Image: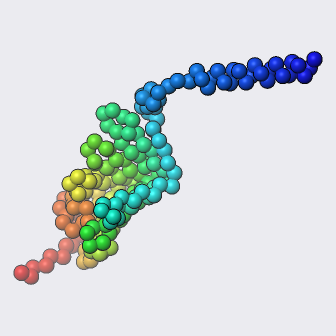
Amino acid sequence: MAKNISYRLINIATILIVAMFFSCGNDIKEVQDFLAEKNLPIGAAKNVHLIHTDSGKVMTILTAPVMHDFSNREDHPYTLFPDGVRIVSFDEKGDSVILTAGYSISFANTNISEVKDSVKVVNPAEKTKLFTDQLFWDSNEHYIYTEKKFTLITKFDTIHGQGFESNEDLTRVNMKSIKGSVYVDESP
């Protein structure tokens, strides 16, 4: 008799579980809307290693411990790297520029990214380094800028200031409110 009751309970539990599976009928759009409404990412990844190529040539390598994909936002889709990011960009000659930061957010509609927390940009070929707390990067215009304090180290100088803009590889810079000595080549 006890075995008969046990089998009936197992059968009832199985029927309830099967009914639960078949009663869930959310489509992808409903799930995306729910995640967006609750401010949850549509996807997340750990130990990210992305390689962007163009015509078989590596252009960018991005590594990050964590990535959150908020592309389900209608107005402002974005990708978040809350635990930091490292981006290595290569030019047509194969020279690289390395950007590291403790936090990054990249907006898909505008292709503008904000990086902050111990931002460092290094151009090994030019022996140039930029340090700041916050930096914006416009990947459409290949342009970086900040209104925060910065330190720029070149072959000849160490320059401190507040307000900086440049092309991505730090070869054409415009600095505001600078302090320190600046080497000027006056040869024609």
Q: The N terminus is located in which quarter?
A: top right
Left or right: 36 in relation to 12: left
Q: Which residue is drawn at 21% across and 73% down?
A: 181
Q: Is residue 131 visible?
A: no
Q: Is residue 155 visible?
A: yes
Left or right: 90 in relation to 5: left
Please state the horizontal and vertical placement of residue 11, each as a whole percent of the image: 77, 21
Left or right: 18 in relation to 128: right
Left or right: 39 in relation to 58: right
Q: Which residue is drawn at 48% across and 44% down?
A: 44
Q: In this view, does 78 lie above or below 63?
A: above
Please state the horizontal and vertical placement of residue 139, each as a whole percent of the image: 26, 54
Please state the horizontal and vertical placement of residue 17, each as a whole percent of the image: 68, 24
Please state the horizontal and vertical placement of residue 79, each as a whole percent of the image: 39, 45
Q: Judge by depth and name the residue closer to the eye, 19 or 143.
A: 19
Q: Which residue is drawn at 15% across and 76% down?
A: 184
